[in-house]
Amino acid sequence: MTRSLLGWGVVAGPFYVVVGLVLALTRPGFDLSKHALSLLMLGDLGWLQRANVILSGLMVLAAAYGILRLIRSGRGLAIGVLVGVYGVGLVLSGIFPPDPVAGFPPGSEPGASVSGILHLLFGALGFVAIGAAAFAYAAWCRAEQVSGRARLSVVLGVLVLVGFVAGAALAQSPVGVALLWIAVLAAWGWLALASARLYAWTPHPVTGARR
């Protein structure tokens, strides 16, 4: 069961990105160089992206439970809890869509709402949590004497945090959107790599061996 749960951490990122790109390329008025994927939650077909985000968040929560089943104390506990917070942030971000921007959905004007503020808060919480999880995982890798994975995890954690903060500050520009993409891909990439490593590290259900 633990391995099955960790497998969702590998699947979640590709699922989110592929579905999001399909929607981005087929929704009228959406421009990948100007608009963040979260804006796809708006409009008549916005429920598709909301479902994408919520389902991806549920996959992350499954992976978090798998981590907690595998490593129940110390840094492992921190990794599992932080990944769980990221999953909760995704689900709540999907429930509370962002505010529209000029030009998307077509004909809409920029605005501010409680839903938009909550979307930003839950998004920020999720990115901070997954970035911190990457650092906790790096510490765990060092304790397991896997220094290469530890360094990669630190790099991905930095990309998540810096990309999100800088991207949010410049969100209305192509540079800001590109930085947000870096943060998103780094977060999903880290989760997939960490889940795959922990999947391999999980004792085999029959032989009890680890790889």
Image: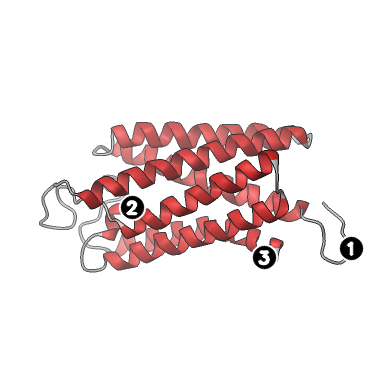
For disc 3, the neighbor class at 10 Å (few under 14, some 14 to 19, many from 20) is: few
Q: Secondary structure at mark 2?
A: helix
For the point 16% across and 46% down, the residue is 112
SS state under label 1? loop
- Percent x, y for residue 208? 87, 59
Q: Are marks 1 and 2 in contact (CB under 8 Å)?
A: no
Other residues around mark 2 within 10 Å, as few (<14) / some (14–19) / many (≥20): some
* First-in-chain label (1 vs 2): 2
**Residue 43, position as x, y percentages in the image:** 21, 63
User: Horizontal placement of 180 versus 46: left or right?
Assistant: right
Residue 93: percent from left, percent from top: 35, 53
| Residue linked to disc 2 | 37
| Whole-number angstrom distance, CA of label 1 to CA of label 2 | 44 Å
State which quadrant residue 138 falls in: top right
Residue found at x 26% / y 63%? 27
What amino acid type is highlighted by mark number 3? Ser
Residue matched to label 1 = 207
Residue type at numbered disc 1: Thr
Q: Is residue 52 above or below residue 88?
A: below
Q: Which residue is mark 3?
A: 4
Work out whether 95 lies above or below 167. below
At 70% from the left and 61% from the top, the residue drawn is: 2
Mark 2 residue type: Leu
